[in-house]
Image: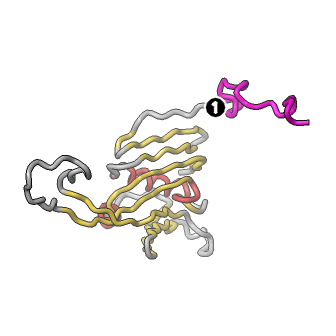
Amino acid sequence: MSGRVYRLHSTLELPLEDVMDYFENDPELPPEVENVDITRRNNTLIIKAVSADDNLSKYTPTAQLKASVTENRVYEEEPPRAGAPSWGDEEEEEIPSELVEFACFKGDLETVLQNTALQYPMFLVLREIAMLSEKGTLTAITEEGDELQATRIVEGEVRAASVEVVENPQQNGSSDSGINWRDNKFIS
């Protein structure tokens, strides 16, 4: 399998426990990836590809997924809004909640998916993780077999996406909206 990742943007957030369960349940990884090494350094989660190819030098950095780990309070039901009217002098009931650690795969290509060796296979792993996420989006432009492919996953569901090739991306039909600095009468 050959492929390449050209653009990627991710805002995925999912419970760290879901990510760990995914890898503990022995998922089907792309053939180029034998296994993954998962490391946590403070508030950073790093999922690094272990190459199935013995010809890849042990000094070649393989692709890795990088997520920040944050702690969020999750309520069993929606908490009352601040400033909402309270009816009577009822005692406020505490809403059951717990602190949950979330893995946040947020950013562009070099922030979320680092290094080029095995980059496309690790993108496929990220795509599977995106299918587990209930919050955030993953958008990407990749190449597989000489064809560009657009990927868009929103809150765990695949959505329609396309790649549009334009002659000059800077001109989106509004060429007269800028300032013509060369003929500006206030600059001498």
Q: Which amino acid, mark 1? A: Val
Query: Which residue corresponds to the image point at 40% horizontal and 36% vertical from the top-left?
Result: 159
Whether residue 163 sits left or right of residue 125 in the image: it is right
Left or right: 182 with respect to 141? Answer: right
As for residue 171 lying within the magenta part, the answer is yes
Residue furthest out toward the front: 89
Q: Position of residue 77 (x, y in %)?
A: 18, 53
User: Circle 1 — which element?
Assistant: loop
Task: Using the image, determine if residue 120 lies above or below residue 57.
Answer: above
Of residues 115 and 2, the one nearer the viewer is 115
Q: Which residues are magenta?
A: 166-188
Residue 6 magenta: no
- The residue under the point 20% across, 62% down is 97
Rendering quarter of residue 143 = top right
Q: Which residue is mark 1?
A: 165
Looking at the image, which residue is at 52% across and 45% down?
140
Q: Closest to the observer: 31 or 139?
A: 139
Which image quadrant for residue 62? bottom right
Residue occupying the far right of the picture: 188
| Left or right of 52 on screen, residue 164 | right
Quarter the C terminus occupies: top right
Left-right relation of 188 to 177: right
Residue at x-position 55% and y-position 57%: 119
Coordinates of residue 9 in the picture (x, y in percent): 52, 49
Dominant SS in magenta: loop
Question: Quick check: can you spot residue 123?
Answer: yes
Q: Nearer the viewer, residue 100 or 41?
A: 100
Nearest to the observer: residue 77 or residue 148: 77
Instruction: From the top left corner, tell me how far across and down residue 103 is, in percent.
Output: 39, 62
Up the image or down, 143 lies above or below 52; here it is above
